[in-house]
Image (tube, rainbow, N blue to C red):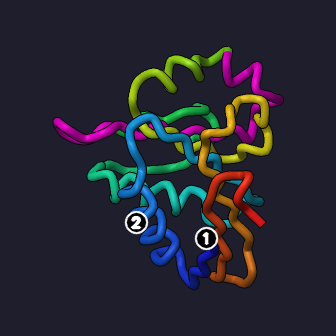
């Protein structure tokens, strides 16, 4: 599915709606250039999952863990901008995160293509104006 958002708050709202459809263990592979809305989308995902903490890009820490209250699925927010490939992701415990039953949101997924097994949901961002974004969500084999 392809969506158009016209503000950061609309991108966050789309992320919130998207997150409400995700089961525990889901992986969202986010693709797009710098400043195209990936972190805003993940902020929305956290809100949609009932997680009320501050969400920011884990560019320097590689992964942030967001935990809600009892009964809330955790959100693991990865930023692969500084990684050179999937091997480095595995070195920081990727498989452990996959096994913890949370939702993984992976920014800069284009930097770690070997980390995905085909079950991930691709979320592609395109900046089409100062505040406008085209966001395409779906399994890789179903994207145009």
Report x, y in % for residue 44: 42, 61
Give the secondary structure at mark 1: loop
In front of the other: 3 or 41:
3
* Mark 2 touches mark 1? (CB < 8 Å): no
Q: Quadrant of the C terminus?
A: bottom right
Residue at far left of view: 70
2 or 1: mark nearer the eye? 1
Q: Judge the density around disc 1: few (<14), some (14-19), many (≥20) Cα neighbours within 10 Å.
A: few
Q: Look at the image and say whether residue 86 sits in the magenta stretch.
A: yes
* Position of residue 115 in the picture relative to residue 41 (left or right): right
In the orientation shown, which residue stands out farthest toward the right?
84
- At horizontal 61% and vertical 70% (from top left) the residue drawn is 1
Above or below 39: residue 115 = above
**Number of numbered labels in the structure image:** 2
Residue 140 drawn in magenta: no
| Magenta stretch, residue numbers | 67-90
Q: Is residue 26 left or right of residue 30?
A: left
Q: Which residue is mark 2?
A: 17
Q: Position of residue 15 (x, y in %)?
A: 47, 63
Identify the residue at the far front of this view: 142
**Residue 46 percent coordinates (x, y):** 38, 52
What residue do we see at 75% from left, 81% from top?
Answer: 128
- The x, y position of residue 30, in whole percent, is 65, 52
Per the image, the residue denoted by label 1 is 1
Dot 2: within a 10 Å radius of its alpha carbon, few (fewer than 14), some, or many (20 or more) residues?
A: some
109 sits left or right of 6 in the view: right
**Would you identify the image quadrant in which residue 127 lies?**
bottom right
């Amino acid at each position: 599915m392809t969506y158009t958002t016209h503000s950061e708050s609309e991108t966050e709202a789309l992320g919130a709606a998207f997150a409400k459809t995700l089961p525990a263990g889901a992986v969202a592979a986010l693709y797009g250039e710098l400043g195209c809305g990936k972190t805003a989308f993940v902020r929305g995902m956290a809100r949609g999952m009932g997680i009320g903490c501050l969400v920011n890009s884990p560019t320097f820490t590689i992964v942030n863990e967001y935990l809600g209250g009892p009964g809330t699925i955790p959100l693991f927010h990865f930023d692969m901008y500084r990684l050179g490939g999937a091997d480095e992701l595995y070195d920081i415990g990727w498989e452990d995160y996959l096994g913890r039953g949370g939702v993984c949101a992976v920014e800069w997924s284009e930097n770690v293509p070997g980390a995905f097994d085909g079950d991930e949901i691709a979320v592609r961002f395109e900046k089409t104006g100062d505040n406008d974004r085209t966001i395409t969500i779906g399994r890789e084999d179903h994207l145009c």
